[in-house]
Amino acid sequence: MKNDVIASHFELLADLLEIQGANPFRIRAYRNGARTITSTSESLDEMVRSEKDLTELTGIGKDLARQIHEIVTTGKHVALEELRKAIPGGVLDMLRIQGVGPKKVSVFFNELGLKSLADLKVACETGQLAKLKGFGKKTEESILQNIDLAAKQGERVSIAEARAAAEAIVEDLRKLPEVEQVSVAGSCRRRRETCGDLDVLATCSDPGPPMDRLAAHPLVETVLQRGDTKQRVRLRTGIELDLRVVPEASFGAAMQYFTGSKEHNIVVRQRAKDLNLKVNEYGVFRGEEQIAGRTEEDVYAAVGLPWIPPELREHRREFEWADAGKMPMLVTVNDIQGDLHMHTTASDGAATIEEMALAAKARGLKYIAITDHSKRVSMANGLDAVRLRQHWKDVWDVQARMSGIDILCGIECDILEDATMDLPDDVLAEADLVVAVLHYGLKQPGVQIMKRLMAAVSNPHVDIIGHCTGRMIGRREGADVNFTDLLKAAADNRVMMEINAHPSRLDLDDIHAAAAKDHGIPIVISTDAHSVNGFEVLEYGVDQARRAGLTADDVANTKSLKEFRRLLK
DNA sequence: GCCGTTTTCGGCCCGACTGTTTTCAGTCG
């Protein structure tokens, strides 16, 4: 059973408890537990079966440990099932409506007996809601307006889409002479894989001009809220954006607050409290006196912390690193010297070997590996042994007439459903670099998926496991990979792990890339470029590596080709 | 429900905006 499944049990339980009006700290305990579970690389299923002590995990106490044990060993979850009996599933859907939270849902269910979004819509249309105590005409109208969007609520957009929109708005606001500073914040600044909404922060003595400017921006569909310092809008794409305007002296504090994550900020504020200080979006205060706030560095310093890179602000290991004085110097795009996964017209790429090499060179890369598909991927015109050997000759020809970049003869070789490789060993042995991947049969049971991955890892010619789960973010679940076993085997067999930089892949994800580092496994960040523009996604891969806390030294393709070759088997 | 190098009980971050209210609750991030 995947960790995410267990975590979703606790998230659902927390939602149901909220509707029941349970102790908010008990609810938070369940949510904290869920967060810990999703950010643990090790499989909880494995931990239970090997009788490890789950309460060693932060936020998992005796009761949650017992419930995890129950879920894993029996497949049941009595606490959750009891609550679900009391509250029909359709009631939970109401939580997705903007402006409707657990308290209101509780009233709808308990006082009006509404059990679904459809019930609620009828109740609004017939004016039943406005008759309730604490409700009025405006609430009714607002619900009617938002109810059809409820299905879309909670949908997240890729980091690429999020950044494109947020950065366009930032650039536009920057043009205003009144605006002093403006920046993207929130999960987009933390470079999460997906964003649920967008956050933009500006400093300006008068919030009017930036708010007016945003409201008139072509990407903006409607203004949802507008107050003295905060404006919320919905973009035409459906995603919502918050603009916060604060005075210059509060910019750092507001950036810190507005970048989050919520969990990270709770720790920062708790630490401030322990020092008899208060942190809010306006600054760090001792009593009435503001002692920091202009820059983020000041804010962190005031609570005894080094500046923490936004990518690490998830309340995972950043405070531990800060306390130990071991905040990692995160890898940057400029550190990358090589790209070890790309395609050409020989399979499904849009550019020739030469065009790809020239484009890579123009981007400052020192070496690349040409890794077209193997034959199993017939729809991508994958290569058999004969075509592949000819292709490599073509690579040599290009190399012979090109200087300033080294080109490796590689292959993206499929790991077939029966756990054999798509090309014979003698062919793989001739390659400079073999990237082994799953493309087909991703829905096979975990046991078979692992048989395939373990076969690839123990193949003497495989150098890298590429996009190891095969997921497509928001569209397709990845394979059921047991990372505890995979990473151990990769470390034992000197196989590297890829972070695929394409914004719809990004696996290894941050959690497992961090675990790979713990195993001493070199990570490669590869673009999987299918055209000369395909190299542009590199930064998304680097961002994922940064979220994993990786330094340049942890990333194999920051090294010179000579040093990189030493990492190969 | 979790947690503890002052604690095994008594805490658990903080503020903006809205709609419904005369002082605040609910929602959101």
Image (cartoon, grey):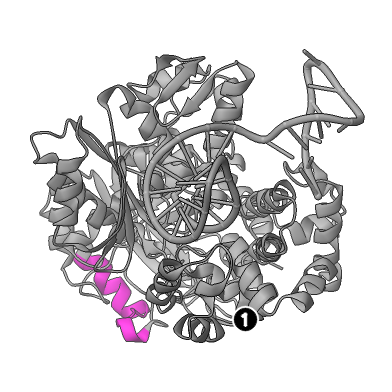
Q: Is residue A40 above or below residue B12?
A: below
Q: Main secondary structure of the magenta part?
A: helix
Q: Is residue A246 above or below residue A382?
A: above
Q: Position of residue A505 (x, y in %)?
A: 41, 64
Please rate how many residues cluster around mark 1, counting C-alpha atoms within 10 Å: few if below 14, some from 14 to 19, many from 20.
many
Viewer can see residue A414: yes
| Residue highlighted by disc 1 | A114
Q: Is residue A560 magenta?
A: no
Give me the residue at 19% from left, 34% from top. Answer: A206
Give me the residue at 82% from left, 66% from top. Answer: A79
Viewer can see residue A168: no
The amino acid on which the numbered mark 1 sits, given as a three-letter code, is: Leu
Give me the residue at 72% from left, 41% from top. Answer: A58
**Quarter of the figure with residue A383:** bottom left
Relative placement, left or right, of A48 versus A188 is right
Q: Is residue A327 above or below residue A234?
A: above
Relative placement, left or right, of A546 versus A337 is right
Q: Is residue A385 magenta?
A: yes
Which chain's residue wears label 1? A
Quadrant of the image containing the N terminus of chain A: bottom right
- Magenta-tinted stretch: A378-394
Q: Nearer the viewer, residue A483 or B10?
A: B10
**Quarter of the figure with residue A545:** top left
Q: Position of residue A380 (x, y in %)?
A: 31, 81
Q: Secondary structure at mark 1?
A: loop
Q: Position of residue A349 (x, y in %)?
A: 23, 72
Q: Nearer the viewer, residue A333 or A386?
A: A333
Relative placement, left or right, of A434 versus A111 is left
Give me the residue at 43% from left, 54% from top. Answer: A499
Q: Nearer the viewer, residue A247 or A252?
A: A247
